[in-house]
Amino acid sequence: MVVIGGITRLTESGLSITQWKPISGIIPPLNDAQWQAEFANYQKIPEYQQLNQGMTLAGFKAIFFWEYLHRLLGRLIGLAFALPLAWFWIKKQIPRGYTPRLVALLLLGGLQGAIGWWMVQSGLSVRTDVSHIRLAVHLLVALFTMAGVVWTALDLRALARRSDARPARLTGFAFAAGAVLFVQLLFGALVAGLNAGLVTDEWPLMNGKLFPGPTTTGESFFGALFNDPAIVHFVHRWWAWVVVAILIALARAVRPVDRRASIAIHSAFGTQILLGIATVMSGMNIALAALHQFVGALLVIATVWGMHAIGRSR
């Protein structure tokens, strides 16, 4: 789901479906008249009128495919979670204390769908793309939900092995590691939303400079920090090393408890750094960029695994 969402953004496909139909939207256009109707809706928005004027129906179908697949997979994930949850609830087979958490995860999934439509709406009237702030919220809620699913799964696996196992606790250090990673994920999402990866194809310098300076004028410090493509790219590029430092410390703390989690953390952040550099130097190659987002999700999973492990050891 994370990868398809990334490809949807990278291929500028997110505004191809201009309506939100939770039920009937499951069925794609099935004949030429329906395709023409969808295309006509797309032709009314600024993205088509200002950027894609003259796009063929075949070109529209190509971008429609990714947005449709993204929405369809979201619905399937919701069903894959909701139906078994209802079944085990009816059968009274959910372990004591876990029902509220599982329901909260289901609600987060539903909220994510609503946030996705809120994001799309931002690009249907004035803008030629979606709001980068709303895109960041959309991605961060997705990753937070995924982290909650992983943490809960680890708790349930421990309970299956030992009937007296208690849920892991979130330690202060684990929270700090998660917060540092959260900042990096935020700026990664802003890079995607602002197309800030295209500011430069150099590394470690940015167009011959270590610090490129703002590309916009009249912005306040915080305005530039969250809205200027060059500044956002710079922060994402160098905050990564703060993330590396704290994840090395987390991996060292985890190693005596769960060596596999320690290896996973090291492997994920090492691969992610290399992919990030390669993505920039390739001029934002779509395959590399999608892989960068995929490994970013794996890094979140590995980090949550480590955070859970040190919480379990207490």
Image (cartoon, rainbow, N blue to C red):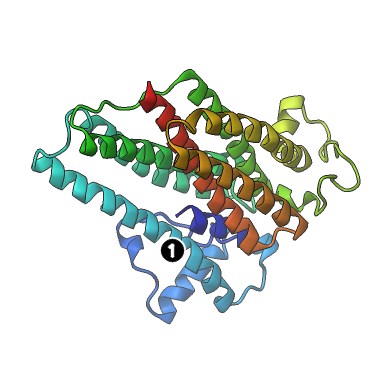
Q: Visible in this render: residue 53?
A: yes
Q: Nearer the viewer, residue 154 or 119?
A: 154
State the SS at label 1: helix
Seen as rendered, the residue at the extreme right is 208
Left or right position of 86 against 188? left
Residue 307: percent from the left, percent from the top? Answer: 45, 30
Residue 215, image x and y in percent? 83, 41
Count all numbered tags in the image, as a single digit: 1
Asked if residue 46 can be seen in this view, the reply is no
According to the image, label 1 marks what residue? Answer: 69
> Which residue is drawn at the image coordinates 55% and 51% (left, top)?
295
Name the residue: 34% across, 67% down.
Answer: 27
Can you give x and y, in whole percent of width and height, for residue 84 in the image?
Answer: 20, 49
Q: In the rendered structure, which amino acid carries the disc numbered 1?
A: Leu
**Looking at the figure, which quarter contains the C terminus?**
top left
> Looking at the picture, does residue 51 appear above or below residue 168?
below
**Label 1 crowding class (10 Å Cα cut-off): few <14, some 14-19, many 20+?**
some
Of 256 and 311, nearer the camera is 256
Residue drawn at x 51%, y 50% as measured from the top left: 120
Which residue is at a point 33% across and 38% down the rendered structure image? 154
Give above or below for 311 relative to 240: above
Residue 290 locus on image (x, y percent):
58, 58
Q: Quadrant of residue 150?
A: top left
Above-or-below relation of 245 to 11: above
Q: Residue furthest bottom?
A: 32
Quarter assignment of residue 147: top left
Picture layout, residue 126 above or below residue 56? above
Indicate left or right for 145 with 283 as reference. left
Quadrant holding the N terminus: bottom left
Examine the image and state in which quarter residue 181 appears. top right
